[in-house]
Amino acid sequence: MPDATGLELIAHELRESEGDEAVRETSFFRGRGAIEIAPERIRAVLAHLRERGFAFLASVHGVDYYPHEPRLGVHYELLDMARVDRITVKLRVPTDAPEVASVTADIPADAPGGPQRGWLTADHQEREIYDMFGVVFQGHPDLRRILMPEDYEGHPQRRDFPVGGEPVAFTYNERDALGPM
Amino acid sequence: MEVKREPLGPAAGLGAHVDPDALRVRSLNAHQLLRGADMQGANQPAHLKGTELDRYVEERILTTTLDKTVAWARSNSFFPLAFGLACCAMEQFHAAGPRMDIARFGFEAFRASPRQADLIILAGRVSIKMAPIIRRLYDQMLEPKWAISMGACCSSMGVFNNYALVPADKFMPIDVHVPGCPPRPEALMHGVLKLRKMVQDDPDMGWRERYDAHGTEEVIEAGEPDDATAAAVNVVGGQPYAKDTAGA
């Protein structure tokens, strides 16, 4: 882990290279350093951290901060395998425009921000976050549902999604619970 | 060493010193009685009359109906589908293991293909995405077929009663629900034996009527089967899928 000072140094580096608005907040809690960034800068920030040694994207998480706004969050857990060092990059997007740039695909040299290598491991994890939270990852090569059926409506891990479930069918309410058979 | 074979029974003329109650003698006697052979010697049915003859026959002959015999055979030789969905499957394996030993009752032939199975044990939770696949497996199984819903999840969804799961009763007929989370192997055995009793009493238990499931039989049309028909493994309204899609 970077200690609290190391985290501030990394945040400072990011502000220098990507601009002041790129880093919104840093937090150091229970030994875990996290940087909250502006969602539109995710590719640049991850590229910078990769240069710095955090070359392994361990996982991508979705979060719903309901009732706080902006509600949806995406967490990127980065690992520096040489120094055994971890850092979390967080971003927040609102539910009415839940759009983040995908980090899966490579950015070609002639595109803005390129050339940049993608993080292939993010492919399925971004699909899962799209499935469960409805975050749209722009530029993802194959953004489909991964866990729920293709025709499923809604994003079930959002906090305002009803827990759902079925009424339990016992003999006395079999017809009501299961419908006409 | 010389092996001496001695014929038994009256045919060998040994009636006097052969124990008339020995099992072999009794079976030979019953056999000859059935063939109408006229037997000589003491304690032979040819000399029995009236109630004594009735008793003699009752002791040796069992009559039943063909249906009951078939149900008896079926109920003692379920071929379960080797199929596990979640943690309950561990208990299901254990029921086949040496401690519970499902083979004592003749149910140990777990089949890897639904075409060879007539009992499906839904051991675990059924997700919405898995349900059509399970229904397809069930439709492919041999008739008559039975289903056991094992554990809380696929009966009432238990602790996973949320957006992702569906109760098994919603998409297929279940004959026996085994409660528990997960049920112990003894409980599964109890459920299977309950099912055995049900099958012995009433082979199909009228489930098509109970579930209004007419038309779900797998029907392969008579005549020369083309490849599409032969490959049709699922049915809707008695028609193979291939038939529907060919017209559309």
Image (cartoon, rainbow, N blue to C red):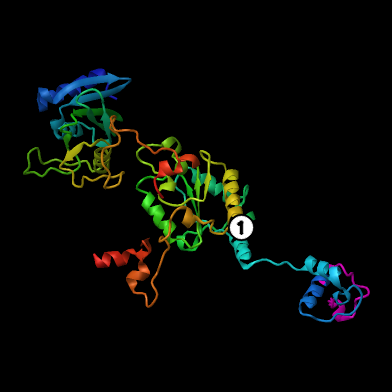
Q: How would you rate the neighbour count of disc 1 (Cα within 10 Å): few for under 14, some for 14-19, many for 20 or more?
A: many
Tell me the amino acid under the disc marked 1.
Answer: Gln
Is B59 on the left or on the right of A161, as rendered?
right
Q: Is residue B106 left or right of residue B131?
A: right
Which residue is nearer to you in this view: A23 or B226?
Answer: B226
B143 displayed left or right of A179? right
Image vertical order of residue A44 relative to residue B111, above or below: above
Q: Position of residue B95 (x, y in %)?
A: 58, 48
In this view of the protein, which residue sits in the foreground, B81 or B242?
B242
Q: What residue is at 92 percent from the left and 75 percent from the top?
A: B42
Q: Is residue B39 magenta?
A: no
Q: Say above or below: A14 vs A100.
A: above
Query: Would residue A117 be seen by someone viewing this image from the given angle?
Result: yes
**Residue A98 screen position, x and y as percent:** 18, 34
Tell me if residue B23 is in the magenta stretch: yes
Residue that label 1 marks: B200
What stretch of residues is rendered in magenta?
B1-24
Q: Is residue A102 visible?
A: no
Magenta segment, principal secondary structure? loop
